[in-house]
């Protein structure tokens, strides 16, 4: 019996190899070793654009996430990719990265490693008409002695308004790269971007009834676009792409005094961070420590909610942090 099984397996392997050599016959093998026909490969560096592709291209592409769930994205580079993973990327049709200074090295490394391939790159920062500089808040100034270097804030996906703009830009790029599916992609793009437009309206209608207008982050601050688009003030310990994780006593004291003076109901942190500083300040102000999700470091559990779901979750957090009056007209 074992001999028969071995001969059958050998015959199947030989047949597979011969089919791959026949003119006009192509077999693609995925990382899992399964054939996947002629579906093109689209790779996204982080979750927001990965989920947008899922909703627009659906089953017409092999959609993959480059940076694993739960990974600190700012530390990720080609050095973290296996040889087999790099080989797979050589067959990618489109890689969607963030852009901006913190992504610059990763993009450069990928372009070098994939030289000679037919892969095209799309940057989220190229899809937004009005980019903003990183904001240097009072708390950050206390931490950095006021030293400030102007850089574009690349966290363009944290606002539902910008998310709709990104979705339409990604949809256009998919249509250009895979024109045979243009009609389907255009339909799916408008359907998905329309949901983001609706969420934008929900944000506007909900947040106009807020009691407070300031958010305090005992953490990094990747929410420049979110706060700008909905007229919210913010103060934080670190800039969005800072590698620092432990605020100084001077910074914590500044944030505490500001939250206390404004009588804010919450102190915020972002996903992937230790919430201990937010909890520490909240215990002193009598408020809550809450996590606002930047959709940057996404766990597998969070991914089940989808990009839209995470943005909707953030609105619920903002209701508490800004004291939204539910009974207001």
Image (cartoon, helix red, strand yellow):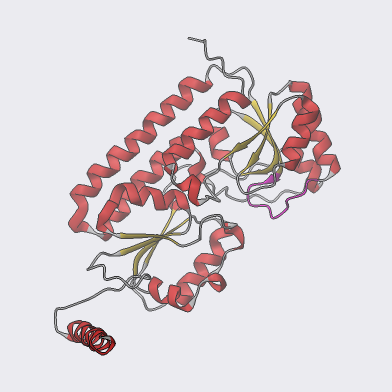
Is residue 177 shown above or below 119?
A: above
- In the shown orientation, is residue 98 left or right of residue 257? left
In this rendered view, identify the residue nearer to me: 290 or 53. Answer: 290
Q: Position of residue 132 (x, y in %)?
A: 55, 43
Residue 261 makes an appearance in the image: yes
- Image-quadrant location for residue 285: top right
Q: Which residues are magenta?
A: 238-247
The vertical placement of 193 against 244, above or below, is above
Q: 8 or 291: which is nearer to us?
A: 8
Residue at 32% x, 40% y: name it. 192
Examine the structure image and report whether residue 244 is included in the region drawn in magenta. Answer: yes
- Image vertical order of residue 137 relative to residue 322, above or below: below
By secondary structure, the bulk of the magenta-drawn segment is best described as: loop
| Residue in view at x 70 percent, y 46 percent | 274
Residue 175 can be seen in this image: no
Q: Residue at x 60, y 57 (%)?
A: 72
Q: Which residue is more in the foreground, 242 or 138?
A: 242
Displayed quadrant of residue 25 = bottom left
Q: Where, by quadrant of the figure, is residue 168 drawn?
A: top left
Query: Which percent across, then down, holds residue 282?
Result: 74, 31
Residue 133 rendering spot, x and y as whole percentages:
59, 45
Residue 213 horizontal side relative to residue 277, left or right: left
Magenta-drawn stretch contains 105 = no
Q: Is residue 200 left or right of residue 179?
A: right
Q: Is 50 placed left or right of 316 in the picture?
A: left
The N terminus sits in image quarter: bottom left
Residue 329, given in percent of the width and then of the height, sits at 48, 9
């Amino acid at each position: 019996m074992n001999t028969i099984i071995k001969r059958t397996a050998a015959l199947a392997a030989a047949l597979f190899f011969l089919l791959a050599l026949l003119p006009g016959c192509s077999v693609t093998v995925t990382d899992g070793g399964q054939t996947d026909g002629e579906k093109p490969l689209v790779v996204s560096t982080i979750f927001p654009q990965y989920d947008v592709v899922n909703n627009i291209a659906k089953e017409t592409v092999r959609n993959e996430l480059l940076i694993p769930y739960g990974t600190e994205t700012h530390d990720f580079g080609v050095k973290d990719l296996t040889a087999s993973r790099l080989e797979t990327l050589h067959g990618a049709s489109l890689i969607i990265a963030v852009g901006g200074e913190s992504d610059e090295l990763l993009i450069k490394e990928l372009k070098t490693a994939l030289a000679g391939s037919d892969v095209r790159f799309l940057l989220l920062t190229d899809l937004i008409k009005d980019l903003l500089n990183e904001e240097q808040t009072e708390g950050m100034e206390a931490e950095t002695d006021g030293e400030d270097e102007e850089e574009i804030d690349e966290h363009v996906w944290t606002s539902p308004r910008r998310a709709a703009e990104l979705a339409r830009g990604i949809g256009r790029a998919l249509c250009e790269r895979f024109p045979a599916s243009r009609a389907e992609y255009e339909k799916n793009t408008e359907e998905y971007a329309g949901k983001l437009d609706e969420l934008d309206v929900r944000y506007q209608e909900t947040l106009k009834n807020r009691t407070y207008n300031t958010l305090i982050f005992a953490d990094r601050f990747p929410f420049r676009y979110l706060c700008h688009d909905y007229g919210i003030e913010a103060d934080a310990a670190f800039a969005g792409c800072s590698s620092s994780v432990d605020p100084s006593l001077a910074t914590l004291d500044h944030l505490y005094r500001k939250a206390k003076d404004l009588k804010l109901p919450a102190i915020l942190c972002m996903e992937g961070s230790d919430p201990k500083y937010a909890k520490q300040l909240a215990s002193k102000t009598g408020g809550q420590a809450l996590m606002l999700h930047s959709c940057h470091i996404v766990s597998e559990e969070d991914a089940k909610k989808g990009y839209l779901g995470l943005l909707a979750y953030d609105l619920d957090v903002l209701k508490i942090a800004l004291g939204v009056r539910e009974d207001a007209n």
